[in-house]
């Protein structure tokens, strides 16, 4: 997309195309008075309008994709920080609790259930983070493919 939008020929067409068409329409020569000349100018004007509309759509799409990519990049950064902090914290907590593993009593059973539940939730969260990372990576690769 960027390559197309930065093409000097397209930029020149956008800057000068409308003025050239206007001059062609106003021109009064023996050639310009012919019906086939006027028809050709109208065909060219129609094509110019189509190109102008498509360039506008391309710019809008490019802007949207850039915003989406910015969001994805920021999300990945936040996700990584969140994953690092919560996983480290959760793993550290579980390691601290592991030293009490041999201690078994009916009174501590409720805490053992909570620790196991916490571990399941932590594992589930880590899996969702990994799935989201995979989806984001695929989206970024697809965006990069379309951006070429």
Image (cartoon, rainbow, N blue to C red):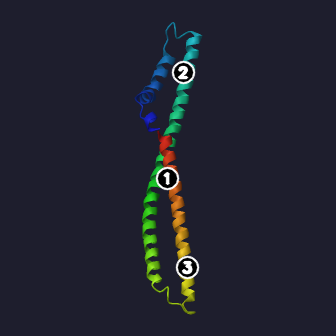
Q: Nearer the viewer, residue 79 or 91?
A: 91
Q: Which label lies toward us, 1 or 2? A: 1
**Residue at numbered disc 3:** 116
Residue at screen point 57% across, 20% down: 43
Among numbered discs 1 and 2, the one appearing first in the sequence: 2
Tally of numbered tags: 3
Label annotation for residue 128: none
Label annotation for residue 44: 2
Whole-percent x and y of residue 19? 45, 24
Among numbered discs 3 and 1, the one appearing first in the sequence: 3
- Compute the Cα span from label 2 to label 3: 72 Å
Q: Is residue 66 above or below residue 34?
A: below
Residue at screen point 57% across, 25% down: 46
Is residue 62 in sight in this rendering? no
Please, which residue is most extreme toward the left here? 8
Q: Nearer the viewer, residue 106 or 59?
A: 106
Q: Are marks 3 and 1 in contact (CB under 8 Å)?
A: no
- Compute the Cα span from label 3 to label 1: 31 Å
**Residue at numbered disc 1:** 137
Q: Which label lies toward us, 2 or 3? A: 3
For mark 2, give the secondary structure: helix
Whole-percent x and y of residue 11? 42, 30
Whole-percent x and y of residue 90? 46, 75
For mark 1, give the secondary structure: helix
To which quarter of the image does residue 13 belong?
top left
């Amino acid at each position: 997309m960027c390559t197309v939008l930065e093409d000097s020929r397209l930029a020149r067409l956008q800057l000068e195309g409308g003025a050239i068409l206007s001059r062609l329409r106003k021109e009064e020569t023996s050639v310009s008075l012919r019906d086939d000349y006027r028809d050709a100018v109208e065909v060219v004007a129609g094509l110019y309008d189509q190109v102008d509309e498509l360039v506008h759509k391309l710019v809008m799409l490019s802007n949207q994709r850039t915003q989406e990519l910015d969001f994805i990049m920021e999300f990945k950064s936040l996700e990584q920080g969140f994953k690092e902090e919560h996983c480290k914290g959760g793993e550290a907590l579980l390691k601290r609790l592991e030293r009490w593993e041999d201690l078994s009593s009916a009174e501590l059973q409720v805490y053992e259930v909570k620790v196991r539940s916490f571990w399941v939730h932590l594992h589930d969260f880590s899996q969702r983070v990994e799935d989201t990372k995979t989806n984001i990576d695929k989206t970024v690769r697809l965006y990069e493919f379309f951006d070429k």
